[in-house]
């Protein structure tokens, strides 16, 4: 019962904050509602008994990505000009609603094979052994390290003063 | 009724479509980047939900979500660097005015 109430509250907060990100004219306020949306999604991860993922979500999305976006907003002085909609507003709305309809129909019409097994608790040791253990995801982990290094170098080169 | 897989998938679809609408309709490049972050988060929710309800002991969906987060962080860093670089050269980040490569 408590889980259901938590899910509905978090879902309403998350969807409302996402709508605020899209509809608010002020870019800075949109970035702040993006933080609220990320926190609500971290709560959703907790209701899915993915505690480690919720912590990582708060650390990376709220701690790193949102701060990066706010820094970029402050560096580009776009707050005064606002965040207007383009000419594609009406077609974009139609496309988004159509996509939502198709995905919802697919979700409802598909007979999912839900397992009755209770979730793993705690998840952190299991995730560590899946990531770094034998037969796990050790190769993607190393590839992702190269990707992050390339992204850091690319960002530095792009914003370097000539 | 109890909260099942469908609820999480519909929530994920709603968030994804809000992000899609923002990414298509906005003119500010940073607002588009924020909408793309919402879409990535929505995809992660559905993967974690599948991991919780379909294969609760394998955790594959949670590991995918971790990789999505890392890629999103790299994408945000490079994307914002490109936006700042464009702003430095052209004094705007309105995507209708950034038509340098338009034929």
Image (tube, coloured by chain):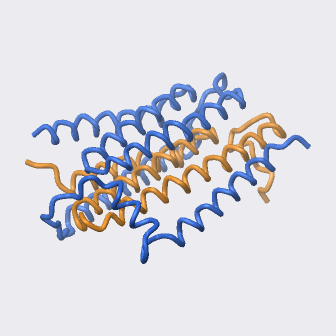
Chain colours: A blue, B orange
Q: How many marks?
A: 0
**Left or right for A139, reference B42:** right
Determine the image quadrant of residue B34: top right
Q: Is residue B88 above or below residue A98?
A: above
**Left or right for A53, reference B67:** left
Nearest the camera: B26 or B57? Answer: B57
**Left or right for A113, reference A27:** left
Nearest the camera: A112 or A39? Answer: A39
Quarter of the image with the C terminus of chain B is bottom right
Determine the image quadrant of residue A67: top right
> At x 64% / y 25%, what residue is drawn?
A79
> At x 22% / y 51%, what residue is drawn?
B7
Give the residue furthest to the bottom: A135
Give the residue furthest to the right: A162
Q: Is residue A32 above or below residue A14?
A: above
Q: Position of residue B79 (x, y in %)?
A: 66, 48
**Left or right for A29, reference A3:** right
Nearest the camera: A130 or B62? Answer: A130
Q: Position of residue A118 (x, y in %)?
A: 16, 59
Q: Position of residue A88 (x, y in %)?
A: 55, 46
> At x 28% / y 57%, what residue is drawn?
B49
Q: Position of residue A133 (x, y in %)?
A: 43, 70
> At x 75% / y 53%, what residue is drawn?
A153
């Amino acid at each position: 019962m408590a889980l259901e109430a938590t899910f509905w509250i978090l879902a309403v907060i998350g969807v409302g904050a996402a709508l605020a990100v899209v509809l608010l004219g002020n870019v800075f306020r949109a970035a702040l509602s993006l933080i609220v949306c990320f926190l609500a999604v971290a709560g959703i991860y907790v209701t899915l008994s993915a505690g480690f993922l919720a912590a990582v979500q708060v650390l990376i999305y709220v701690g790193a990505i949102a701060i990066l976006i706010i820094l970029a907003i402050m560096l580009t002085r776009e707050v005064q000009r606002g965040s207007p909609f383009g000419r594609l507003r009406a077609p974009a709305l139609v496309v988004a609603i159509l996509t939502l309809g198709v995905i919802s129909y697919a979700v409802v019409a598909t007979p999912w094979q839900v397992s009755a097994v209770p979730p793993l608790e705690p998840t952190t040791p299991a995730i560590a052994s899946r990531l770094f253990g034998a037969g796990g995801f050790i190769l993607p982990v190393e590839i992702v390290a190269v990707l992050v290094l390339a992204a850091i170098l690319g960002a530095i080169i792009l914003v370097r003063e000539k | 009724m109890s909260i099942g897989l469908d609820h999480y998938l519909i929530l994920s679809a709603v968030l994804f479509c809000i992000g899609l609408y923002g990414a298509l309709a906005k003119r500010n490049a940073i607002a588009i980047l924020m909408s793309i972050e919402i879409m990535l988060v929505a995809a992660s929710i559905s993967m974690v939900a599948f991991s919780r309800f379909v294969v609760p002991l394998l955790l594959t969906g949670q590991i995918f979500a971790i990789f999505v987060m890392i890629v999103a962080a790299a994408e945000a860093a490079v994307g914002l660097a490109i936006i700042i670089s464009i702003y430095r050269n052209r004094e705007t980040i309105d995507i209708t005015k950034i038509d340098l490569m338009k034929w």
